[in-house]
Image (cartoon, coloured by chain):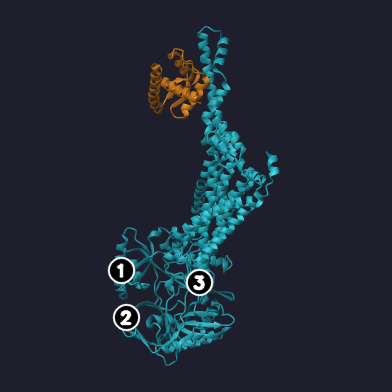
Chain colours: A cyan, B orange
Amino acid sequence: MALMTTLRSLRQRRRAEREFDDEAAFHLEMETEANIARGMSREEARLTALRAFGGVVQTREHVRDTRALRVESLWLDVRYAARALMAQRRFTCAAAGMLALAIGLGTAMFTVLDALILRPVPFRDPAQLAHVWMGTDRGGRVVVSPAVLKAWRESAAFEAAESAMSATVLLQVGETVVARESATVTPGIFKMLSNVRTLRGRLFDPTDGRPGEADRVLVSETLWRTVYGSDPAFVGSSITVDGRRSVVIGVLPSDFRFPSADTVLWRPTNLTGRAEMAKAYVRFASNMMRADSLRLATEAARAADGNTAQLRPWVYPLAGLTDSNATQSVRVLAGGVVLVFLVLCANVSGLLLARLTARRREFAMRAALGASRARLLRQALAESALLAALGMAGGAAVAWAFVPVSQQVIPETLLLQTLNPLTLNGRALLMTSAFGVVAILVSGLLPAWLGTSLPAGDSLRVVDRGATETPAARMVGRALVAIEVALACTLLVGATVLTRSFVNMSQADRGLQTDGITTVWLALGSSAATDPAGRAGIARSVEDQLRQLPGVRQVAWSYGLPPHGGMLSFGEWTSDRPGALPINLNLERYVVTPDLFALYQIPIVRGRGFTSSDTFNNVIVSQALASRLWGDADPIGHSFRFIQETFQVVGVAREIHFPSLDPRADLPEFYHPYTDVPSTPMVSLRCEPGCPDAAVIRHRLASSHPTVRVQAAGTVDRKYVAELARPRAAAAVALTFAVFALTATAAGLFSVLSYAVTRRRREFGIRTALGATPRRVRHVVLRDGLIVAAIGLAVGTVFAIPLSGALRSLQYGVTSSDPLSWAIVLATVALTAMAASWFPARSAARLDPIVLLREE
Amino acid sequence: MPKTEYLQGALDLLILRTLALGANHGWGIQQRIRQVSGKALAVSQGSLYPALHRLEAAGLLSSEMSTSENNRKARIYSITAAGRRRLTVETEDWRQFTLAIRRLLQEG
């Protein structure tokens, strides 16, 4: 690139010179002939003409400059800038490093934002794809029956309608069993999504999934590589899925993610299985209004299935952040990156300003030799552009390193919501350059303007004395640091609040003991499970199997699993208190065996636990529900109503809590006795020292009870851990940003003060000579630094006010006006400012007036 | 500085005016300025050629290499539309300037 420019400008210059030589020769000949016509001899005429023409060489150079100057001088600027940057390696490294960090962080953040929010799902014409549930206006949503899906395929409403149902499967590889996410799909789904190609083998045929041909699977590249060791003869071989042999017919590339990001195995179905339901994915017909399509779909569904008479289709996106809390946290993250970006740019700006003002002598010299202001500005900007180019290259590398890190830091609950891979791509690199351009404009323009401003009358001699900084540069340098302090302070407020939220939430009272408890959610899918006695028999034999697992001490059955896993009931609840009004409440209900309270160590604080004589309407209420319904009165023996039902209170259990960023997640609860085994019961196991792995439990039950399916298994802790993931990630990211910003700010303050001290050496020398103590001189510099920090803190406080609003969705048990958080912020900023000012102050105090006077 | 600027402005005006009458080469322009001004204005080649190239770079003139009447290679300059517009403006400016000077001189 640079070479091409040089060659082109060289060629242009040569041509301009040659053409001018021709022009000059013509002029001379014309002049000579004119002179001959006036009566001179040929020789005399030629000499006169040459004399009249003057310096051919000078004129030629002058002409050349007007013609070919632009490109060439730009190249000169770049070369000069490169030399200037090479000459100041430490400065160059610091500035380019900071720009690289800023640009890299920005790019990494964009990659995350792009994958999670901006980019649509990676399939053809994604706007036409949707996930459809049937539901009522009140909020209930159900999957559709195969009849409805078939009706939709035949109606004009949709171009295609297919099904994909997720489930956890057990894969047996040699002696080990692993649990992975799979999907049972209708064969046409790949055609509907489009752009799907296998890496090896083929996709499903329409015949796959028919009875007898269902034992075929597609496997993701990830699974093939990680679990099956990239076996080259994998396609056509058979693997064990949920205890059944299945033939692998193809391998799908790892970037194919559907229906969820962690699906790694696909099985075919034609929806003819007993009681099989469809989870509908559709492609809308492109030539029809959305409302018309949905009207047609409603009519088709109602005609096909009488159960859907009251329902209508509800359209959801295929994937992406739909929850406003999650979107908000990603936005806050992006805001944090912007703040760090600005701090780093301000810092580079400060560094550039110091550099350029230190070179005022050079600029004054060039101005005296005839360089215009525009010319000087261009040269100064060439330097910051070159720095930004270095920053961009470094930034791409930083982003490349940061993206895998962000994959670790961002909670899985967020990452699983996108079907896009989180990788650095062309869009992100384009963004890198955009950030680079913004960085030059933000950090380079002001210093270039100030650095090249040479007021009239500011002669070389005055500049040369270099007694002090110019007032403008001094003001701007201080202002930049104050802005950095303000931004860093804002980030620090955020980081403190988020860290305290995380700590508060992880230490919040849970009301139950979760250590060493694993839960298993079963589906008793055999024919014996249709009558209560049959279900009770299966449950007993399952319990026997579970008790034999190593470490299992206690077993309790339930329907609904605490915490935050009960049946949700919302509506009006009325207590039997005289004159009591109905209260609108959302409640969780659990159906539990008597020993569940002991297993979870939930004490019964009043009344009694369940006995075998209790009926379904004898209930134990939680403390929060008791106080909502009866206030301080003893609820034992009282009753309450919900729609048609009346419940008798036999006991009060301690409230269980589910600390969450979403305050709606922590609901009061009450318990029913476990009078009948449901077809999908839950078992809780307490084990010592620890429970067997979920895959072990699945495998055990798969071999002892082939008809019983494990729908989900895992520790209770994981629910709390998952809920803590977001505050933890927010705190970790915010702290990292705050540390970046504080370090950059400290470096900025340090460089501004150090520079000021070198400019004021004479002043400090004279002060010392006149009797100022080193202490006094040190105070002058320290005060300078602390004033800047104080102004920054004041501005940062103002900045933090809108921040508190933005962070509300990520706060738990703390507000941004929290005094402790502010004390931490003030102390940290003050200490940082002290530390950054200390070294320049010390070096000012150590100046020796004798040495200084000798320098003069 | 003001002195050169004044002269430069005048030189541009003279070149544009000369070329407005017809395309010409450098020597021709120089001869014409000398003749028309009654030899009062002599433009040196050292200022003429840079001025020509500068005006061309600014888009007020265009040029091409061609063969002259006596079969020699010569660069022929001609005025562009932008050059004509500039000429009108500059001529008016110059009139006002000389008028002002004349008034000033008549006062005394």
Say the numbered circle drawn on residue A581.
Answer: 2
Please state which of the two labelled residues, at mark 3 or mark 1, is closer to the viewer. Answer: 3
Say which chain tag 1 marks: A
Q: Residue at x 44, y 61 (%)?
A: A806
Q: Eyeballing the image, is A359 above or below A194?
A: above
Image label count:
3
Q: Eyeballing the image, is A347 above or below A36?
A: below
- The x and y percentages for residue A585 are 37, 77
Please state which of the two labelled residues, at mark 2 or mark 3, is closer to the viewer. Answer: 2
Q: Earlier in the sequence, mark 2 or mark 3?
A: 3
Pick the quarter of the image with the N terminus of chain A: top right
Callout 1: few (<14), some (14-19), or many (20+) C-alpha neighbours within 10 Å? many
- The x and y percentages for residue A486 are 51, 55
Q: Are marks 2 and 3 on the same chain?
A: yes
**Looking at the image, can residue A153 be seen?**
yes
Q: Residue at x 54, y 28 (%)?
A: A64
Contact check, label 2 and label 3, Cβ < 8 Å: no
Q: Residue furthest top?
A: A39
Say the numbered circle drawn on residue A505.
Answer: 3
Q: Secondary structure at mark 1?
A: helix
Q: Earlier in the sequence, mark 2 or mark 1?
A: 1
Amino acid tagged 2: Leu
Q: Rounded to the nearest whole Å, what is the CA distance between mark 2 and mark 1?
A: 40 Å
Q: Nearer the viewer, residue A285 or B83?
A: B83
Q: Eyeballing the image, is A372 above or below A508?
A: above
Q: Rounded to the nearest whole Å, what is the CA distance between mark 2 and mark 3?
A: 34 Å
- The x and y percentages for residue A816 are 48, 64
Amino acid tagged 3: Met
Q: Secondary structure at mark 3?
A: helix
> What residue does disc 1 label?
A298
Say which chain tag 2 marks: A
